[in-house]
Image (cartoon, rainbow, N blue to C red):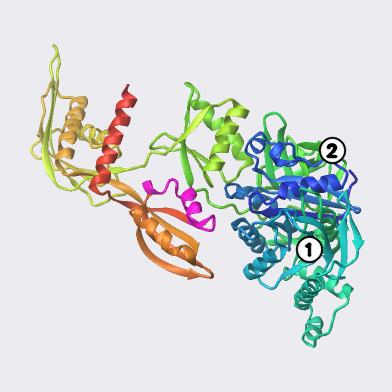
């Protein structure tokens, strides 16, 4: 593959609802360009971009895959992204280096949740957008209906460039709405001019008028002529399309059938014709220097070399690959690149272009292009690589918060130590996964976007690292406390010949009022009934017991313990005796002082379209939640509530189901409060069974 200059490169992220045909479009493009001799099929597991074992097994894209295609002396770097919401991190990575979003919409299903999400993601980053209506060969395909839905959802920027020609269910060709010329597809899928089919003229005239209105928004002179009902030349419309696409005010719409390889050539021709080159869209990019000040990095091959790392592949068989976009200058082998975030200089041995699982070595890559390094030591996703003489740091990728947490339990004995090491390698690839060992429960916790993502992690642990695990609900970090004041005596007496053990304490137990602290210890001993030298042993006895309360073995909070009296023996008393006496007093006193269980309460904000407000509020009530209020922000409602944390572990999946993927939420621990009696009884019984099982 030749080395392309910045004005010959286009970086396009394919977005859309799962199953709309993004991967199939890539396959058709590869076939059109001569890279492949046949069309791969997702169902057959033989596509270039979906090569991972999990993708083949599940028949869906899981990872973003870079597929460079040479077409009309231009390099099109397509980035195939997952449509399933659990893998939004991959979409975010792709968009961080894309210069345009190609949103794929099903001609049968129309605008779906994934379409809306794709639009939102592109809007957030200010990326130009083009839409490809795929599946025109389906008997239920309805292009005009899809266009109406797109305009109703996204406004007047929607500008169809084509009108399909269909003979019943058969997709035969299209009419160019700019030039009002008709084309039919040959047996090889290539379009050839033909006469205008009967009955299409009015439809094409309507589309042409829509194009005029869309491009009029890009230029004041065109707007004036539009209002005067003057027609535009084809060149003016194309120029307006180019300007409008770059500015994000025009969204061209094309149609085709990836399964029959129809319309893909036209799609690639159109991208090259109306999409500005990579460095025209982003002539400069704002970065930070070592002092934290903003600096402008020029997207030019004569500028100092810099690159942004947007993805890491950590495969035990392929090795570690670092995918990057050249932000400026030229990246070539044997170059030394500085990583300012890690303060480490890497020597580049080889430069590759990635096409699915294939690595193609190239001598260099110029500004705007996408490539890969192998076996770098310190670099991870979101890092910057640059010249040490011209240090810049590019803005990282903003990933959504991972709120779906499960405990990872090994199925095999002795595999506990392998969990952290194996998962850490997978975390290099997916930045939306988090892993921690909970210091309180000692559980290994993995957090992600949704249950499918976590299931994939389990499969990869088994396939790649021979580690068989299962996911279980995490232990809820309940707390124990008392609600009344009691005074109890604890006596420890043991005689076994020679010196014995003797210690007696009288301790008052009461609530301290501070749920953030475990205990407060005081002493009010008069007359030396307990010598001062044993006070630390008494406190140590309390300190040990608050770690696991008598009620259900959870940590104790909000306790005040006051040593008021006791007895000692000048020979047999010891620190151990007083510590044991305190432990006995604690056990009795705690259970007499109206013990109760506290549960963690989370502050939750759910963001949903208006239509789902009632469902969300009803569901929150079922979860024992308290609605605090609602705020209308744009077209969505922000519903605030306080909910027991125990009710929220699987909420990401359940919210997605309730809102068809349109809802999101944030969660933050707020405080502890007393759990209802029925909840307490269930928790206590369950906890006792757990503890008994552990003893066995």
Q: Where in the figure is residue 162, as x and y percent of width and height?
A: 80, 65
Element under disc 2: strand
Judge whether 46 appears above or below 616 on screen. above
Q: CA distance from mark 1 to mark 2?
A: 27 Å
Q: Which mark is residue 40?
A: none
Tell me which residue sits at (81%, 36%) in the image: 349
Where's the C terminus, which quadrant? top left
**Residue 609 appears anywhere in the view:** yes
User: Considering depth in this image, is 663 or 276 the residue closer to the camera?
Assistant: 663
Q: Residue furthest bottom?
A: 228
Tell me which residue sits at (33%, 26%) in the image: 693
User: Considering depth in this image, is 497 or 230 the residue closer to the camera?
Assistant: 230
Q: Where in the figure is residue 658, as x and y percent of width and height?
A: 47, 55
Q: Where in the figure is residue 201, as x and y percent of width and height?
A: 82, 72
Q: Is residue 338 left or right of residue 401?
A: right
State which quadrant residue 311 falls in. Answer: top right
Which numbered disc flags the more N-terminal residue, 1 or 2? 1
Judge whether 12 appears above or below 687 on screen. below
Tell me which residue sits at (62%, 56%) in the image: 114
User: Considering depth in this image, is 521 or 17 the residue closer to the camera?
Assistant: 17
Q: Which residue is mark 2?
A: 361
Would you say residue 158 sits in the magenta stretch?
no
Instruction: Please state the extent of the stretch shown in magenta in the rendering.
Output: 646-665
Q: Neighbour class for label 1 at 10 Å: few (<14), some, many (≥20)?
A: some
Q: Which residue is mark 1?
A: 281
Q: Is residue 644 left or right of residue 161?
A: left
**Residue 288 appears anywhere in the view:** no
Q: Neighbour class for label 2 at 10 Å: few (<14), some, many (≥20)?
A: some
């Amino acid at each position: 593959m030749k080395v392309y200059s910045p004005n010959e490169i286009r970086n396009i992220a394919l977005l859309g609802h799962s199953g709309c045909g993004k991967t199939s479009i890539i396959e058709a493009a590869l076939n059109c360009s001569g890279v492949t001799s046949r069309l791969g099929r997702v169902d057959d597991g033989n596509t270039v971009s979906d090569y991972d074992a999990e993708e083949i097994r599940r028949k869906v894209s899981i990872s973003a895959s870079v597929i460079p295609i040479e077409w009309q002396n231009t390099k099109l770097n397509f980035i195939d992204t997952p449509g399933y919401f659990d893998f939004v991190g991959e979409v975010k990575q792709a968009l961080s280096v894309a210069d345009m979003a190609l949103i794929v919409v099903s001609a049968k299903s129309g605008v779906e949740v994934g379409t809306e999400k794709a639009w939102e993601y592109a809007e957030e980053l200010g990326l130009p957008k083009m839409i490809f209506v795929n599946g025109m060969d389906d008997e239920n395909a309805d292009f005009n209906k899809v266009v109406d839905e797109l305009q109703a959802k996204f406004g007047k920027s929607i500008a169809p460039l084509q009108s399909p020609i269909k003979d019943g269910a058969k997709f035969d060709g299209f009419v160019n709405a700019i030039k009002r010329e008709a084309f039919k597809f040959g047996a090889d899928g290539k379009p050839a001019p033909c006469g205008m089919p009967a009955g299409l003229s009015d439809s094409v005239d309507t589309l042409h008028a829509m194009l005029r209105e869309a491009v009029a928004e890009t230029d004041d002179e065109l707007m004036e002529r539009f209002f005067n009902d003057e027609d535009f030349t084809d060149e003016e419309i194309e120029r307006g399309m180019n300007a409008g696409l770059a500015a994000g005010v025009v969204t061209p719409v094309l149609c085709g059938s990836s399964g029959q390889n129809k319309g893909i050539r036209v799609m690639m021709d159109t991208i090259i014709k109306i999409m500005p080159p990579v460095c025209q869209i982003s002539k400069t990019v704002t970065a930070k220097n070592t002092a934290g000040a903003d600096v402008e990095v020029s997207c030019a091959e004569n500028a100092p070399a810099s690159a942004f790392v947007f993805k890491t592949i950590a495969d035990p068989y392929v090795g570690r690959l670092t995918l990057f976009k050249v932000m400026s200058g030229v990246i070539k082998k044997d170059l030394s690149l500085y990583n300012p975030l890690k303060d480490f200089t890497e020597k580049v041995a080889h430069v590759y272009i990635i096409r699915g699982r294939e690595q193609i070595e190239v001598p260099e890559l110029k500004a705007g292009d996408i490539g890969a390094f192998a076996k770098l030591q310190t670099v991870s996703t979101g890092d910057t690589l640059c010249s040490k003489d011209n240090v810049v740091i590019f803005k990282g990728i903003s990933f959504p918060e991972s709120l779906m947490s499960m405990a990872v339990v090994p199925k095999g004995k002795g595999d506990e130590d392998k969990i952290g090491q194996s998962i850490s390698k997978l975390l290099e690839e997916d930045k939306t996964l988090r892993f921690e060992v909970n210091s309180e429960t000692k559980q290994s916790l993995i957090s992600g976007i949704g249950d499918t993502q976590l299931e994939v992690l389990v499969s990869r642990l088994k396939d790649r690292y021979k580690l068989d695990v299962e996911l279980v609900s995490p232990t809820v970090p309940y707390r124990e406390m008392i609600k009344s004041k009691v005074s109890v005596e604890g006596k420890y007496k043991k005689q076994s010949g020679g010196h014995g053990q003797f210690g007696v304490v009288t301790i008052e137990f009461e609530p301290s009022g501070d749920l953030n602290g475990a205990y407060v210890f005081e002493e009010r001993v008069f007359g030396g009934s307990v010598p001062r030298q044993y006070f630390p042993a008494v406190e140590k006895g309390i300190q040990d017991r608050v770690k696991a309360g008598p009620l259900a073995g959870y940590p104790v909070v909000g306790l005040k313990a006051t040593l008021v009296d006791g007895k000692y023996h000048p020979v047999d008393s010891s620190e151990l005796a007083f510590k044991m006496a305190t432990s006995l007093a604690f056990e009795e006193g705690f259970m007499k002082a109206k013990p109760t269980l506290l549960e963690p309460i989370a502050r939750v904000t759910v963001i949903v379209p208006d239509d789902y407000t009632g469902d969300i509020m009803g569901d929150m009530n079922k979860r024992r939640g308290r609605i605090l209020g609602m705020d209308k922000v744009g077209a969505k409602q922000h519903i605030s509530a306080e909910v027991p944390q125990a009710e929220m572990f699987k909420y990401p999946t359940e919210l997605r189901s309730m809102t068809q993927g349109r809802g999101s939420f944030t969660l933050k621990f707020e405080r502890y409060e007393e759990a209802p009696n029925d909840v307490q009884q269930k928790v206590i019984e369950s906890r006792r069974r757990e503890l008994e099982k552990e003893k066995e």
